[in-house]
Amino acid sequence: MPATIRLPRACPGTMNARKLARMIETPDSFAPGVIPEPAASGPTWVCVVQDSRVLVLEDNGQLAPASLALTVFEAQAEKHYLGRLGTQPCWLLLAPPDAAAPPGLVWQGLRSLFATLDGAHLAVLTRALQIAEWSATHRYCGACGVATTEVTGERARACPQCGRTAYPRLSPAVMVLVTRGPELLLARGARFKVPIWSALAGFVEPGESLEDTIHREVREEVGIEISDLAYFGSQSWPFPHSLMVAFTARHAGGELQPDGDEIVEAGWFRPDALPALPTSASIARKLIDRLATDLRSGSARA
Ligand SMILES: [Zn+2]
């Protein structure tokens, strides 16, 4: 795993921000589950996934209707119950890799649905995509190579030969937005196709606490020291299975020296003169917006 998270791919900058859904957050009305329950008696909601892409209507980008999805794919797809949204049972159908999209439908990436799906269903879909990715990449035991089987009653796949059990994996990552007086530290990653500026971020490495990762990443990427770490929030980020944990911090010393590898530019920005920012579906944007608002109003930590 790379030491630094690939923020550019996770933060598309080409979408119209006015059309984007609110930040991806699981709603209180969602009750996760593995086995269908009686309370899930409403109309079925289905997402059909193939290779991290979702089946949508070609003309408007909405999810394929449940009736159509079930008619076409129920017999050939791997099914996963996700839980219920209110009374609505939510299902993932994992289509075979070579299954063609029916006429009038296409396979599209999750980002295309940021603008078309409501926030609640978008959150369920991001969960579904992580389960789909895990299931598709754990068909064989990582220890002995024998085909795994689903474990009844839990989200797991087990090896019938050596007993190894594989659960959906998460890759924890941290994000930190550093302030210096009235300014925010934003950086532009090397992999951005369009120039998007965001907070610094990176994956947690074995043996590290979240705090260790933040200090290491900030030193590696821009060469400064920080202090006063404060937890801000977290977000599941399905590209493909991150848990992003966001913090704020203060500049404690040193001049910005972008590493030139992961980070090509970094700078201190006043809240009334911010550059192009990540999508509003991301916690990165929520973090930046919140601190920028606080700095404008003078309520940020001094
Ligand atoms: Zn095995």
Image (cartoon, grey):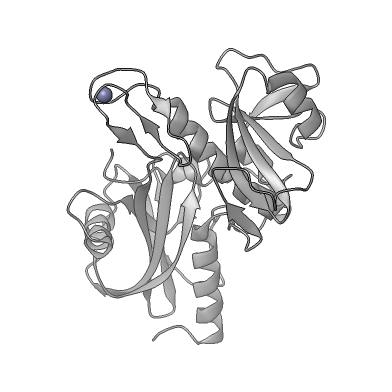
- Position of residue 119 relative to residue 14, above or below, is below
Displayed-image quarter of ligand 1: top left
Q: Toward which corner of the image does residue 80 lie, by quadrant?
A: top right
Rendered position, 259 above or below 147: below
Q: 125 or 218, which is in the foreground?
A: 125
Q: Quadrant of residue 25?
A: bottom right
Left or right of residue 153: residue 158: left
Residue under the point 73% across and 53% down: 87
Number of callouts in the render? 0
Residue 58: in sight, yes or no? no
Q: Position of residue 273 (x, y in %)?
A: 55, 67
- Of residue 245 and residue 214, the one placed in the foreground of this image is 245
Q: Residue at x 37, y 39 (%)?
A: 167
Q: Is residue 42 visible?
A: yes
Task: Decide: is 88 above or below 162.
Answer: below
User: In x, y percent, where is residue 105?
Assistant: 76, 23
Q: Is residue 15 left or right of residue 245?
A: right
Q: Residue 238 location in percent, x, y?
A: 49, 43
Quadrant showing the N terminus: top left
Q: Is residue 266 above or below residue 61?
A: below
Decide if residue 164 is on the left or right side of residue 155. Answer: left
Quadrant (top left, top right, bottom left, bottom right) of the C terminus = bottom left
Q: Residue at x 62, y 43 (%)?
A: 36
Q: Residue 250, image x and y in percent? A: 32, 75
Name of the residue lying farthest toward the left: 207
